[in-house]
Image (cartoon, helix red, strand yellow):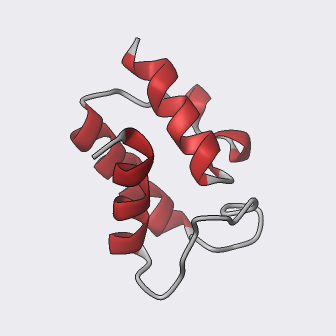
């Protein structure tokens, strides 16, 4: 399973009623509330073995699956 598929799986587990595959405004559109965002950050940290600093927690890094996957790839380096 690649990073994008893992991100999609995590999102599906957190919010099973929404398919966020092509959503471009996950945060700004209100698809995730603050509790769900914290769950996402925790799951990303655990799944990928990364630390997501407070500076990374901005809408631009979480508004789409591509943005989340890009942030993960950047933090894996």
| Residue occupying image coordinates x 64% and y 40% | 61
| Residue occupying image coordinates x 75% and y 61% | 25
Q: Position of residue 56 (x, y in %)?
A: 58, 31
Q: Position of residue 23 (x, y in %)?
A: 69, 66
For the C terminus, the quadrant is top left
Q: Give the farthest residue toward the bottom.
A: 17
Horizontal side, residue 59 vs residue 5: left or right: right
Q: Using the image, determine if residue 31 lies above or below residue 34.
A: below
Q: Give the farthest residue toward the top.
A: 77
Q: Using the image, determine if residue 12 lies above or below residue 45.
A: below
Q: Position of residue 18 (x, y in %)?
A: 53, 82
Q: Quadrant of residue 10?
A: bottom left
| Residue occupying image coordinates x 54% and y 77% | 19
Horizontal side, residue 12 vs residue 27: left or right: left
Q: Using the image, determine if residue 20 lies above or below residue 40.
A: below
Compare residues 38 and 65 and report the one nearer the observer.
65
Q: Quadrant of residue 67?
A: top right
| Residue occupying image coordinates x 73% and y 41% | 60
Q: Quadrant of residue 2?
A: top left
């Amino acid at each position: 399973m690649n990073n994008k598929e893992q991100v999609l799986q995590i999102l599906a587990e957190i919010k099973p009623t929404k398919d966020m595959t092509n959503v471009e405004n996950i945060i700004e559109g209100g698809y995730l509330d603050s509790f769900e965002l914290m769950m996402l950050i925790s799951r990303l940290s655990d799944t990928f073995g990364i630390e997501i600093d407070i500076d990374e927690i901005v809408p631009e890094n979480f508004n789409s699956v591509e943005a989340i996957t890009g942030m993960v790839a950047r933090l894996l380096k």
